[in-house]
């Protein structure tokens, strides 16, 4: 239960970064932290206390293994997250080129 | 059954080939993208007929049982959505043949559009929640890049805003999927709902509902989550805006919402009321903000929010008649909103401005755009005999039948507001007096004309199609949603075969 709670705190830290920070690089880091918190949560779902790796041999009894499905899911989300971060960082660089600042409150040509 | 994976494979292969053939110029890339989109459209027509005969088609990837592995499921609702998505994508690709010529690296646009199309087809076809998330991300990430494609400061700003909000929404969806998995130990949609029927539903399902509503609601741009849409849709190149507004928000938002809420979690508790309230709120906020816009593309973007509000409102009523109205309005909106965005692109191409106040009297110089926009305007503002009138009429009748008189009145009022701002658009842009400093007008190439002509013709015809050939397909799609959780027993039966 403690682990889930810590995971939730990590999620909130990321959300705080996205909502409150003014520097766009810090906002991107906030998104990354939220994503890692959810990845950690998925891993925790599949974890069994003192469970072993889910490798199936032919003459083996299956007892107390961790759930492999969330691990497969997390691998996929990490790859998706990589693509997302690449897009976000390149957009941030382009924004810096155009506006000369990383401050989100000064990037507001759309709202004029 | 072998047909279904083609909807995902063809656009992926096309994107690959476009990237390989980049050095041979824009025409090759454009022809490849057009061929892929055309073949997908023909396949989707084939698929909807196949589904009409067989009801449900299932493709098991690698032959593993759908309960353990990944499966693709095509039923009446997915087949209907496939036709809409692939038709609009094909028309946008034809339009892009001329429109995208001014960009140096147009092949990137075609490759990314194909990725987006693959993602949308994947969202429509998949049978389990996690691959829904994966395809949703494929479509979303390509959309973030496509929004910034023009390269102006505004486009990049809009794209960044959209990317941050969209990625947080996706993470909410992933968190919801994780919670559902921890509760039911399965990811297959049909299996989840059959497990949920046997265990007591605690507060967890309510929490997951909120996560999904926020996540998919942001993708659909329902009102509290709408702020990215006007920026993103107005900054993107016109063919992209047409796909985004016409089908993208409906596939990733509305389709995913109704699939998850009607067929998986069960449409009960406070959900109908929440859907209706959010729908009415979207209608009004969208319509009022659209009225205040001076940039035509921003006006159309706000109008999209308003029209998606109608769809969400009708889904919230939940009776079969209301769902028929929702799906028919989705179809109509997918026809006339791309028409407006493509015409906005043509106006920009021809005159170089999107500003409503610097237009005026364009009808003499660009009669084609003027009259096709008139058809679209009449349809979207609900003038009989156009398609938009019938779908709004069905939605309002369904609301009255279900006893929601207040909401029905509000829907009528929002319809009148829609009429007002489209009349404003037509008078200011096309029928008004010519401006003091007249705009220089460039001729519009044929490839930018005929998709618009097709859409304008379709927006008249859909009203009659409802009586005739369109009805059985729509009815079977409505049946999928209105049978709710019971539909999954049918699906599980097919899985076991």
Image (tube, helix red, strand yellow):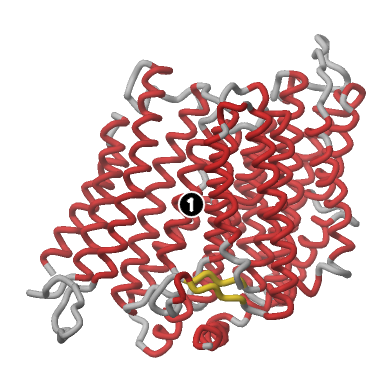
Q: Quadrant of residue B396?
A: bottom right
| Callout 1: SS | helix
Residue with the mark numbered 1:
B218
| Residue lying furthest front | A58
In the displayed structure, would residue A96 be above or below residue B85? above
Residue drawn at x 42%, y 68% as measured from the top left: B209
In the displayed structure, would residue B291 be above or below residue B283? above
Give the total of numbered labels.
Answer: 1
Report the front residue among B363 and B428: B363
* Residue B228 on image: x %, y %: 50, 41
Horizontal relation, residue A5 to residue A79: left or right = left
In the displayed structure, would residue B468 be above or below residue A109? below
| Residue lying furthest top | B437
Horizontal relation, residue B278 to residue A75: left or right = right
Report the front residue among B238 and B158: B238
Horizontal relation, residue A34 to residue A110: left or right = left
Q: Chain of mark 1?
A: B
Horizontal relation, residue B278 to residue B80: left or right = left
* Residue B43 on image: x %, y %: 70, 60
* Residue B497 on image: x %, y %: 53, 88
On the rendered image, what quadrant is the N terminus of chain B found in? bottom right
* Residue B437 on image: x %, y %: 80, 9
Residue drawn at x 42%, y 57% as measured from the top left: B134
| Residue lying furthest left | A50
Residue drawn at x 42%, y 79% as measured from the top left: B67
Report the front residue among A108 and B194: B194
Residue drawn at x 35%, y 54% as measured from the top left: B171
* Residue B10 seen from this side: yes
């Amino acid at each position: 239960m403690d682990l889930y709670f810590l995971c939730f705190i990590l999620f909130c830290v990321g959300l705080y970064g996205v909502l409150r920070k003014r520097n766009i690089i810090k906002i991107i880091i906030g998104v990354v932290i939220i994503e890692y918190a959810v990845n950690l949560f998925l891993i925790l779902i599949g974890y069994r206390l003192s469970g072993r790796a889910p490798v199936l041999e032919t003459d083996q009894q299956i007892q107390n293994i961790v759930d492999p499905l969330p691990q497969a899911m997390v691998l996929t989300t990490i790859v998706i997250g990589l693509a997302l971060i690449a897009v976000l960082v390149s957009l941030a660089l382009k924004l810096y080129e155009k506006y000369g600042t990383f401050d989100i409150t000064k990037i507001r040509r759309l709202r004029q | 059954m072998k047909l279904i994976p083609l909807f995902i494979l063809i656009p992926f292969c096309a994107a690959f080939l476009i990237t390989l053939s980049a050095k041979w110029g824009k025409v090759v890339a454009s022809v490849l993208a057009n061929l892929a989109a055309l073949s997908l459209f023909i396949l989707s027509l084939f698929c909807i007929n196949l589904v009409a005969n067989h009801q449900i088609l299932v493709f098991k990837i690698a032959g593993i049982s759908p309960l353990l592995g990944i499966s693709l499921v095509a039923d009446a609702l997915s087949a209907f959505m496939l036709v809409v998505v692939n038709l609009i994508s094909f028309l946008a690709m034809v339009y892009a043949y001329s429109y995208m010529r001014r960009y140096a690296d147009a092949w990137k646009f075609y490759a990314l559009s194909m990725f987006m199309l693959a993602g949308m087809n994947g969202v429509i076809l998949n049978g389990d929640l996690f691959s829904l998330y994966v395809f949703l991300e494929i479509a979303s990430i390509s959309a973030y890049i496509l929004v910034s494609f023009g390269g102006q400061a505004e486009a990049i700003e809009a794209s960044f805003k959209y990317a941050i909000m969209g990625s947080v929404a996706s993470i909410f969806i992933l968190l919801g999927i994780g919670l559902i998995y921890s509760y039911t130990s399965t990811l297959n949609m049909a299996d989840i709902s059959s497990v949920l029927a046997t265990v007591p539903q605690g507060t967890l399902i309510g929490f997951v509902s909120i996560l999904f509503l926020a996540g998919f609601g942001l993708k659909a741009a329902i009102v509290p989550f709408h702020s990215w849409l006007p920026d993103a849709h107005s900054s993107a190149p016109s063919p992209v805006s047409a796909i985004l507004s016409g089908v993208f928000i409906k596939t990733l938002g509305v389709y995913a919402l109704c699939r998850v809420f009607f067929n998986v979690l069960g449409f009960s508790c406070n959900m109908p009321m929440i859907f209706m309230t959010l729908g009415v709120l979207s209608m009004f906020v969208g319509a009022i903000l659209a009225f205040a816009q001076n940039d035509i593309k921003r006006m159309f973007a706000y109008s999209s929010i308003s029209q998606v509000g109608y769809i969400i409102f009708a889904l919230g009523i939940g009776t079969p008649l209301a769902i028929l109205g929702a799906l028919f309005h989705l179809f109509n909106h997918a026809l006339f909103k791309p028409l407006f965005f493509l015409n906005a692109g043509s106006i920009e191409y021809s005159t170089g401005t999107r500003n409503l106040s610097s237009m005026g009297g364009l009808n003499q110089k660009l009669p084609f755009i003027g009259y096709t926009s008139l058809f679209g305007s009449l349809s979207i503002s609900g003038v009989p005999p156009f398609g938009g009138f019938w779908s709004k009429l069905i939605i309002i009748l369904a609301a009255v039948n279900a006893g929601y008189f207040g909401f029905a009145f509000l829907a009528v009022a929002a319809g009148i507001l829609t009429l007002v701002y489209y009349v404003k658009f037509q008078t200011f842009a096309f029928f008004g007096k010519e401006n003091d400093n007249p705009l220089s007008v460039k001729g519009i190439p044929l490839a930018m004309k005929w998709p618009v002509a097709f859409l304008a013709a379709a927006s008249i015809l859909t009203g009659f199609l409802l009586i005739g050939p369109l009805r059985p397909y729509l009815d079977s799609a409505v049946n999928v949603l209105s049978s709710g959780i019971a539909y999954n027993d049918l699906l599980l039966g097919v899985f076991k075969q």
